[in-house]
Image (spheres, grey):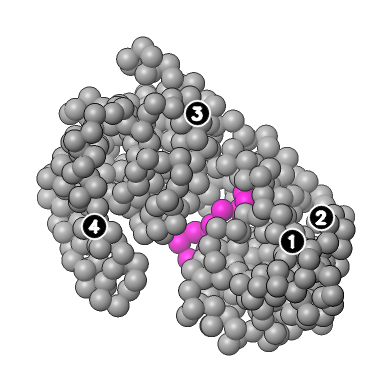
Amino acid sequence: MLILYRVVLFFYVRLIWVASFFNKKADLFLRGRKSQEVRLKSLALQLESRVWFHFSSLGEFEQGRPLIERWKHDYPADKIILTFFSPSGYEIRKNYPVADNVFYLPVDGPHSSLKFIKQLSPRVAIFTKYDFWYYYFFYLQQFEIPLYMISVKFRTDQIFFKWYGKLFKKMLAWVNWFFVQDELSMTLLQSTGNNQVSIAGDTRFDRVIENFEHRQPLPEIRAFTAGCLTLIAGSTWSKDEKLLLKLLVEPAFDHWKFIIAPHEPGLKQIQAIIDNSPVEVMLYSTLKQRFFQSGILAKQGENLLPQGTGKSQLNNSRLLLVDNIGMLSSIYQFGNLAYIGGGFGSGIHNILEAGVAGIPVIFGPEFKKFKEAVDTLKLGCSFSVATYQELLTYFTLFQNIEKRTMAGNRISAYIRKNRGATSVILERLHHDLKTGN
């Protein structure tokens, strides 16, 4: 099985190399790893206490961010090392100010993983959710470097619980402690003979609450949505956008505005939405430029349009496309209803960012891997759609302010009830590091 694991990784790297000739992400994947060798050699020469946080991509980073920032507060002398497997995390967070160094994780292997761990020499390693790498886990265990996994959610269909998953099941024993999201995850782990586990919940709840409490004011978005009901569609893919654009031609909804933040807001994706939109489209970059160049802003809380700017100049479009990354969590404060993308692919994106703003959430049919989606569906504050007719039905339902308010209050209360995972994890980590367990 280990030979097969190495063969898969070998061909994976070769496929990335081929893709790098025409795919920007693949090119960044390879070039980013090559360009960091000098920094890693320099790091290996420095004597300092390091804590290693690893994330697959940007979404996992947001899960671990509350823990990173609390750790830096509690252990200011520690140097924070971040690694990412995907360019979607590294390229956006490579200048994250709390981290002392940010690297791409070298592809797992007997030589590359050993070399990387020796260069890092962390006193503790913290991985997030689903990132299991055989050789990294093996060498951490060999060097007696404590390894913790946070916000883990196990499912019965995962390879750990199959007859052919012995290699992956072996990795579980090399983790010092699992902080899982729910009781099923703990039961599944214990069924493999591993009892180094406790239920901590999901650190994303802490993060989205913190984000919402420190949200950006975005007066230009407030001006765009002024006097209208607004649907915020976050992290959308083409199948999501196809459904959403149909709603814009429904006469019953002409008092609604739409803000769409594509999962990948590149020129190609943005242009595809513009080409298929039945209404006039405005880009966020254009909105912001017009807004701040047209005059002095009125005071916050009053009319937020710039002086001398008529509403028609900013509000003549019903569809706003967010052509950047990093501000979506702050945009939800202006919504009356949210649509979360990804549900017609491998799985939905973060519904908690929208729910914490107290608005109902709609998403596609691929949601069963996500506990918060299952929970909120049962509570009647999130809703899954597989067809345009189903989307139309729910959108019509939420013309009613009482139904919107009821669902929004429920999902907001659910999120606040589930906060606290960061404190639970830190308490255990502090104890283990002090006692040497």
Tag 4, which secondary structure?
helix
Quickly name the residue at label 2. 300
Q: What stretch is highlighted in magenta?
A: 342-353
Residue at (25, 63) in percent of width and height: 31
Q: Disc 2 and disc 1: Cα gap in Å?
A: 8 Å
Quickly name the residue at label 3. 73
Compare residues 131 and 91 and report the one nearer the observer.
91
Chain-order first, disc 4 or disc 3: 4
Q: What residue type is labelled 2?
A: Gln
For label 2, the crowd category at 10 Å Cα-Cα, with few meaning under 14, some 14 to 19 and many 20 or more, is few
Chain-order first, disc 2 or disc 1: 1
The disc placed on residue 35 is 4
Q: Disc 3 and disc 1: Cα gap in Å?
A: 32 Å
Residue 352 colored magenta? yes
Residue 229, above or below 66: below
Q: Position of residue 235 (x, y in %)?
A: 55, 63
